[in-house]
Image (cartoon, rainbow, N blue to C red):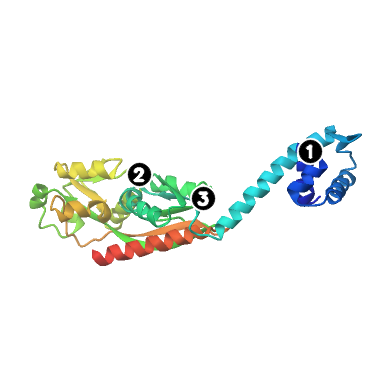
Amino acid sequence: MELHQLKSFYYVATNLNFSRAAEIVSLSQPAVSRQIDSLERHFGLDLFYRIGKRIELTDAGRRLLYYAEQILQLSEQTEKSMLSLKNVNEGELTIGAGTTVGNYVLSPLILEFEKLYPKIQTKLIIANTSTIEEKIKNGSIDIVVIAKSEPHSDLMVEPIFEDEILPLASADYFKNIIRATTISDLSNEVFLLREQGSNTRENIDLLMDKHNFKPKKVIELGTNEAIKHSILRGHGIGFLSKFTTQLEIDHQLLYPIQINERCKRQFSAIYHKGRYTSPIIFTFTSFLKDCIHNYSRMG
């Protein structure tokens, strides 16, 4: 069974006329008749009743028409999809990101990306890092940008940029700890931290474990903004990405505490390597690297 035979059958079946079908598929009427004969021999079934000059579909013909319509539609969609892959300026891209990079880095950059590539439809899904990791592993999104990923044989990890998690205080709070130079100098302070499952929290926990440090008290808050507002109100020391707080630091609303222990992390673009990778993914990662590089140079 050939696709062109199904196409001829479809137009004969929907028009109940060999001549009309021949015009549509740009073949002679005898050629269309030979294709129908070939299909009937292939299945060993009559597809049409011949009643004088009229034709009607048999039960087998009606059933084949149902499947032929679906096959031809799928064939057309496949053609369009494959052709679109030749043009990296057109298509769809679903991006996943953790809350820090999603809200403060990717959101504004995706708007710029869509200006450059208006025919690429982008969708950004933001959640904590552990949730986003599951989504890329189960294939529900095309690419993720997160600060870490467990080794996985099916995933390609491409480093994009470096970030630093800063200990921060309000202006008044900072005056009382201005002499702090190590994390141990902060043992009597209240720490405002993200929830478990957040990569920001994971990195701070690793830092504290490495230096056998435990603060007087930890208050767990579910968003970067909640931590930021709590710092500004003087409720304690918060740990946040430099990307989320650069504006407040520049305007001297938040003050980085200059301790010796640094907390840096690498953000990477992660996508499946075991399946076909759309050129749109490479277009996006290249765009992202260029933007971050330009940002770093300005910073």
- Residue drawn at (20%, 53%) of the image: 247
Q: Is residue 69 left or right of residue 249?
A: right
Say the numbered circle drawn on residue 155.
Answer: none
Disc 2 marks which amino acid? Answer: Gln
- Name the spot of residue 72 as percent of width and height, x first: 70, 45
Q: Which residue is mark 2?
A: 196
Q: Earlier in the sequence, mark 3 or mark 2?
A: 3
Quick one: 118 or 274, which is closer to the camera? 118
Q: Which residue is mark 1?
A: 13
Residue 255: where, in percent of width, then height? 15, 53
Measuring 14% from the left and 50% from the top, which residue is drawn there?
253
Q: How many marks?
A: 3
User: Picture coordinates of residue 89 (x, y %)?
Assistant: 48, 58
Where residue 48 sits: x, y (%)? 86, 37
**Amino acid residing under circle 1:** Ala
Between disc 3 and disc 2, the foreground one is: 3
* Camera sees residue 183: yes
How far apart marks 1 and 3 lie (CA) works out to 45 Å
Write down the residue under mark 3: 137
